[in-house]
Image (cartoon, rainbow, N blue to C red):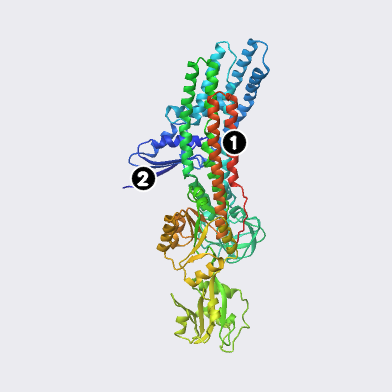
Amino acid sequence: MQAPNESVFVVEDMFCGGCAATVERAVRRLPGVVDVSVSFLSDTATVQHDANVLEDSTIRKAIGQLGYATRAIDDPARASQSSKFEKQMRMRLGVALGFGLWVMMASMIRLFIGLPTEAMAWWFAVFSGIVSLPVLLYSAAPFLKLGWLGLRARVPGMDSLIFVATVAATLGSLVTLANGGSDVWFDVPVMLVTFQLIARLADFGAHRTATNAVRELLDLSPVKARRVNDLSTSELVPLSVLVVGDKIQSHAGERICMDGVVVAGSVSVDAGLLNGESMPELLGPGDEIHAGMLNLNGTLTLRVTSTLGNRRMDVLASSVGRFLNKKTNLMSIADSVAFWLVPLLLVLALVVSVVLLALGTSVSDTLERALAVLVVSCPCALSLAVPLVVSVTAARAAQEGIILRDASVLDKARRVDTLLLDKTGTLTVGKPTVQDVHAAMGFSTDDVIVQAALAGKGSSHPLMLAIHQASELLGDLSNSQSSNHDESPVDVQNRTSDAIFTELPGKGVCCKLANGVVILAGSRQWVSTSVPITVELSSAEADALSYASEVCVALNGEYVGAVYLADELRQDASSLISQLKSRGADIKLVSGDRPDSVRVVAETLGIDWQAQASPEDKAALVVQLTEQGRVVGFVGDGLNDGPALAASTLGIATGKASDLAKNAAAMAVLDGGLDRILVALRITSRASQVLRSNILWALAYNALMLPAALFGYVHPVMAVLAMALSTLSVTLNSLRAGTRRFGHSHGK
C-alpha cells in the first residue's frame, strides 16, 4: 500500500484553539484525508492524504472557504504576516475599548442610575447603539466573518457562538428600539468582542513568546564567521559556506556562530540561552562549544563540527515546531469536548427561548437568558487549556537543551515507576580516563604513559585517545630518561615522523621507528606473546582494578608497564540517583558492558544491575516489566538501545545518541547525564500538573456556569466577564509551566 502524502501549510488569522479545531474538522471531512492535525500554537496544518484522490490546492481551498489564508511552510513572508495580524488585532482592540466605554457608560446610567423619562431612556439606548457601530462593524468583523463561514460549512466554532450572540443581541435591540422600548443589549456584543480581543491577544503573545524562544536565539547568532585560512589570516564569510573541519575565530563579546571543538584559547562563556545555566563556564582546547554561547573574555579558535542547519540550536528550533504539531490524548479530548460544546450551546439557547416563550415570558427576558447561555460557556478556555501548556513546555525544555519529540510525553513522564539506565554516558562521563599506571623496574609511570601514547599515535580507539590526552598533560618529559633504554621519550617522540603504525583490532597497536625501535601497546594476552610480563598485580590490586581496561606497554622487547583505564563515574551520579529514587522510581542499571565494570558502578550507587545485555535483552526486559504492570522509562544513547527505547513507555536518549536512539525516544537530552534527565522529568511533571489543573478548571467552570445561565442567574454582561476571566486564568496558569522552580546542576 502506498504511503500517504504529507502536506504542511501555514494557516493565517487563527484566533485561538477553537479556530484550529474548526479547520481540522473541515479538512478531515475531505475525501482522501488519512489524518490531519491543526495547531494554533505553530499556525500550521499537517495533512496526511492520498495524493491520487486529494490535491494540495483542494485542501487549501477548503481552508480558505472558512476564512483563513494559507501559505507554504517556508514562505519568507510568514513572519511579517504574523506581525501584521497582531498589529491589526491591537487596532481592533483600541477601537473596541474607545467606543465600548461610551456604550458601557450609557448602559450603566440606564441600568443603575435611571433616567427621568422613557423618552430620554430611549435616546440613551439609541446613543449606545450608534457608538457600538464601530465595534460591531470593525472590531467584531473577523469574528463575524469566521463565525458565519463556520456555520455555513457546518463546522461551527467559538466564532460561530460570537456571531450568533452578536446578531441576536443587535437584532433584538433594533426591534426593541423600533417598538419604542429602551431595554437594549448593545453592551453584550461590545463587551464580548472587547474581552475576546484582550484574551486572544494574551493567548497570541503567550504562544508567540513560547514558540519563538529558540527562534530568537537563532536570530542572535551572527550571520558571518571569521574563518582562519592556511596562512593564519582570517576573512568574514557567510555561515552557509562553512564545512566541517573549517577553523573560525571568536572574539570577546561575540556569540559563537557554529558548533565545534576549541583548538586554541581558553575563555569563559555564558551558555544560559542554551541550557539555562546562570554561571559562566570555562572552556579550553578539546572542549565542545555550541553556537549561541556568548564569549565573555577572550579570543578562541574552534574547529567546526556541524554545518548550518545541523547546529544544536537548529535542531532545537526544528524540534519545537514538530513537537507543537503533535497532540496529547488530553488535547484531543479537549478539542472534541470544545467542538461538541458549540452546537450544544446553540441548541440549548434555542430550546430555552422556545420554552420561555411558551411559558409566557417576555421576548426581552427570553433573549437575555438565551444570550447568557450562548456567552457564558464559550469553550475558548477549554481549547487553550492543553495546547498553551504544550507550547510553553516545549520552549522551556528547548532552553534546557532537551528535545521533546512526542507530546504524549507530558502524560507519560509522571507515571514512570521503573527507570532502566544505560551506563556509558549516563552514569559515567562517557569516555575512558586513566585510573592507574603500573611501571616495571627502571621505568617511571610517565614513561609508560608516553610510550603508550607514541605507539597509539593516530589511533582513534577510545583507550588510545585517553592515553594520548593524559600524555599531553605531563608537559616537558626531557628529564624522564631511563637507564634501560637509549633514547628519552622526547627523543623517541621527535622521530615518529618516519614511523610505521599498525593497529590490530581487538589486540593493540604497534609503532616501528626508522631506527628499528618497536613499541607495543595493547591487551595483556597480545603483548605477552612478544614480551614477558614481569610485573603482576596483587590480588587486592586486581580486585580494585577489575572494572578497568588494561593496556600493557613494551619497548624494544622489554616490558615497560601497564595503564589502567575506565569510564569514570560522574561526580554527581550518587546524589542524582538518590533524587530519582525519591521520586518513587525503581532504578536498574542495564548495560552491554562486562560484569566487573557494571557491578562496580551499580554497587557504588546502590542499584540493581544486569551486564552483557544485548539489544534484544534490553528490549525483552522492558516488555517483561511492562507486562508486570510497571510503567517503564529507558535511558540510553547507543545504537543497541534503540529497541528498548522504542519499547519503553518513556524513552530518553542522552548525550550524543545515535540517530536510531534519538528517533526511538520520546525525548532527547542533548548534553549531560542524569542531571539533564532530572530536569527533563521535572519540566514534564510540572507541565502535567498545570495541564490537568487547566482541564479541571475549564470543565468545572462550564459545569457551574452553564446551569446558572440556563436558570436565569447570570446576566449577559456578567456572562461576558466570567467567560473572559476564565480564558485569562487558563492563560496565566499555563505560563507556570515555563517557570524555572527547580535546582540546576549542569556539568560538562
Question: Is 98 placed above or below 421 here?
Answer: above
| Helix, strand or loop for disc 1 | helix
Instruction: Nearest to the eye among marks 2 and 1: give it.
Output: 1
Q: Can you tell which quarter of the image residue 472 is in?
A: bottom right
Per the image, the residue denoted by label 2 is 4
Q: Can see residue 451?
A: no
Q: Position of residue 42 (x, y in %)?
A: 51, 42
Quarter holding the C terminus is bottom right
Residue at the (54%, 84%) spot, across then down: 560
Q: Position of residue 141 (x, y in %)?
A: 53, 27
Q: Can you tell which quarter of the image residue 131 is in?
A: top right
Q: Residues within 10 Å of mark 2 (few under 14, many from 20)?
A: some
* Amino acid type of the residue tagged 1 in the rendering: Leu
Q: Position of residue 441 (x, y in %)?
A: 57, 87
Residue at the (46%, 60%) spot, across then down: 658
Q: Residue furthest left?
A: 1
Question: Is 497 placed above or below 13 here?
Answer: below
Distance of mark 2 from mark 1, alpha carbons? Answer: 39 Å
Q: Residues within 10 Å of mark 1 (few under 14, many from 20)?
A: many
Per the image, the residue denoted by label 1 is 728
Q: Earlier in the sequence, mark 2 or mark 1?
A: 2
